[in-house]
Image (spheres, rainbow, N blue to C red):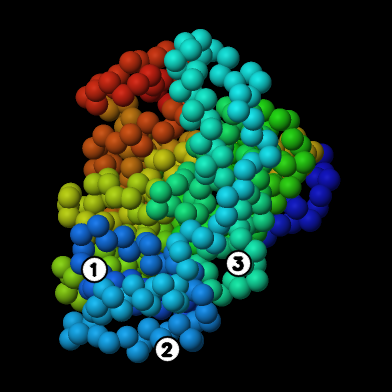
């Protein structure tokens, strides 16, 4: 049946045709920084020299809003008396911060969600213990404390803030994390749905869609210094969970064009890697790859300390890209990404085809085929159904290890190699055991007939997981 929206189908085909491959690991793009971030990084470095490393949080300084324009603030900062090592006295630093900088987090203001009620109807019906129910309601009440909206000041003076304005209410993780984060939002939404807070869950999705539409991908977090990377792509899973609870077809219809963009982002250019398996079949897989080769602004002083162990500028740039790419993975930082654990300077995330990322994208493809059918876009549904079958086969071919009965990350070789297509070799599977090896069990395509184990062999008791049986093609 022809699609009801030829423009939407055209967008899908244009994105597919635009996909590019073959970029060398360190020849990828670098998103430009901003003068505000550059200044805040200098402030961050000065604060470290002044206050010392104990209890120092570099993120605090790149979250500070300005009270005056950047030129005025920079001029005042440059006039601070300094010692030979570039530090200023604590008194002068505190005086400058009090006069010229706002409080970190003040650009978001408290906003109680309109769909919050102290005891939701039908809340956790299977929990019978009074003590456990009381504790669950205490946790439920935290939504009021974590709910925020962007202050009017940001909308009027965007250039004074690293926080990005979002159109609807937000839920923040809390503590030093004063903004929305991408994959955290999946778990937030699962909790909100348990709390029957459907409108708040939809608001979070709408905020993420707004980022996707503006940048072409969902940012790691809602700060200007996070524009160089994304995070595990779970937006379609968020929408799927909401749809199961609400049947909101309008949300699905609104989200589908944006999800097409996200799918393109993860399946083209620097994120796309071609592999040829042992039977000579070609597979298109995805990897994490940040668009950055400098210290991450929120951790600049830490990244520079790591890079100080390296001698050349190119080695440092390579490390900075690996640090940012590992942050994109959400597993920052794990020996999973290191050539020589626990040496963080041996991070090689861009050389790894990860099991979890490709499982998330397979889930996205399954979701998008379903969403397209819901809104009557049958041609798009067929395309994504085919894409999901191809990725399913690719994951079994590239990742599955029959002896270990697990899916294993695949290393494509040295970062210096620049190949159009990589030849699969069994010894390039990472045979260490990580929780990510079992992420495919989250998707019904890979599970067995519903058997359950209490522990993973060789891992210990980690909870109830489905048995990994022979992959189903």
Q: Residue 388: x and y, percent?
A: 56, 38
Q: Residue 269: x and y, percent?
A: 50, 62
What residue sits right under mark 1 in the picture? Answer: 51
Residue drawn at the location 67% of the way across and 56% of the way down? 167
Looking at the picture, tell me which residue is in the foreground, 74 or 465: 74
Left or right of 199 on screen, residue 285: left
Measure the C-alpha gap from mark 2 to mark 1: 22 Å
**Disc 3 vs disc 1: Cβ atoms closer than 8 Å?**
no
Q: Specify the quadrant of the image occupied by residue 211.
A: bottom right
What residue sits right under mark 2 in the picture? Answer: 75
SS category of the residue bearing label 3: helix
What residue sits right under mark 3 in the picture? Answer: 154
Left or right of 6 on screen, residue 111: left
Q: Of callouts 2 and 1, which one flags the residue occurring earlier in the amino acid sequence?
A: 1
Residue drawn at the location 45% of the way across and 47% of the way down? 174
Q: Is residue 210 above or below residue 312?
A: above
């Amino acid at each position: 049946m022809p699609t009801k929206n030829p423009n939407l189908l055209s967008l899908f085909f244009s994105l597919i045709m635009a996909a590019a491959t073959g970029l060398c690991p360190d020849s990828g793009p670098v998103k430009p920084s901003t003068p505000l971030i550059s200044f805040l990084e200098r402030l961050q470095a000065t604060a470290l020299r002044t206050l010392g490393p104990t209890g120092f949080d570099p993120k605090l300084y790149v979250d500070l809003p300005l009270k005056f324009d950047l030129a005025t603030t920079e001029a005042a900062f440059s006039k601070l008396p300094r010692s030979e090592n570039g530090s200023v006295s604590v008194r002068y630093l505190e005086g400058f911060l009090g006069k010229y900088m706002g409080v970190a987090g003040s650009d978001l203001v408290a906003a109680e969600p309109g769909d919050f009620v102290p005891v939701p109807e039908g809340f956790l019906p299977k929990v019978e213990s009074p003590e456990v129910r009381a504790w669950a309601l205490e946790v439920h009440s935290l939504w009021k404390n974590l709910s925020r909206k962007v202050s009017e000041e940001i909308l009027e003076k965007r250039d004074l803030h690293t926080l990005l304005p979002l159109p609807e209410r937000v839920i923040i993780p809390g503590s030093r994390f004063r903004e929305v984060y991408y994959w955290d939002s999946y778990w937030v939404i699962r909790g909100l749905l348990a709390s029957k807070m459907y409108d708040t869950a939809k608001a979070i999705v709408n905020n993420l869609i707004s980022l996707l539409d503006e940048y072409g991908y969902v940012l790691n977090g809602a700060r200007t210094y996070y524009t160089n990377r994304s995070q595990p792509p779970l937006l379609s899973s968020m929408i799927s969970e909401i749809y199961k609870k609400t049947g909101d077809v309008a949300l699905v219809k609104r989200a589908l064009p944006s999800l097409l963009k996200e799918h393109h982002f993860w399946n083209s250019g620097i994120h796309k890697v071609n592999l040829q398996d042992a039977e000579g079949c070609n597979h298109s897989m995805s990897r994490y790859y940040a668009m950055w080769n400098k210290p991450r602004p929120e951790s600049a002083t830490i990244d520079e300390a790591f890079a100080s162990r390296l001698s050349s500028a190119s080695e440092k740039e390579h490390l900075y890209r690996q640090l940012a790419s590992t942050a994109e993975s959400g597993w920052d930082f794990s020996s999973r990404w290191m050539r020589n654990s626990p040496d963080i300077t041996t991070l090689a995330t861009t050389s790894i085809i990860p099991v979890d990322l490709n499982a998330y994208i397979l889930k996205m493809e399954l979701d998008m085929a379903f969403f397209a059918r819901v809104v009557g876009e049958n041609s798009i549904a067929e395309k994504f159904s085919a894409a999901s079958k191809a990725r399913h086969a690719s994951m079994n071919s590239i990742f599955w290890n029959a002896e270990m009965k697990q899916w294993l990350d695949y290393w494509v070789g040295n970062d210096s190699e620049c190949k159009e297509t990589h030849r699969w070799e069994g010894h390039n599977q990472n045979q260490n055991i990580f929780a990510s090896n079992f992420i495919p069990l989250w998707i019904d395509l890979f599970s067995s007939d519903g058997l359950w184990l209490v522990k993973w062999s060789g891992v210990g008791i980690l909870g109830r997981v489905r048995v990994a049986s022979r992959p189903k093609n």
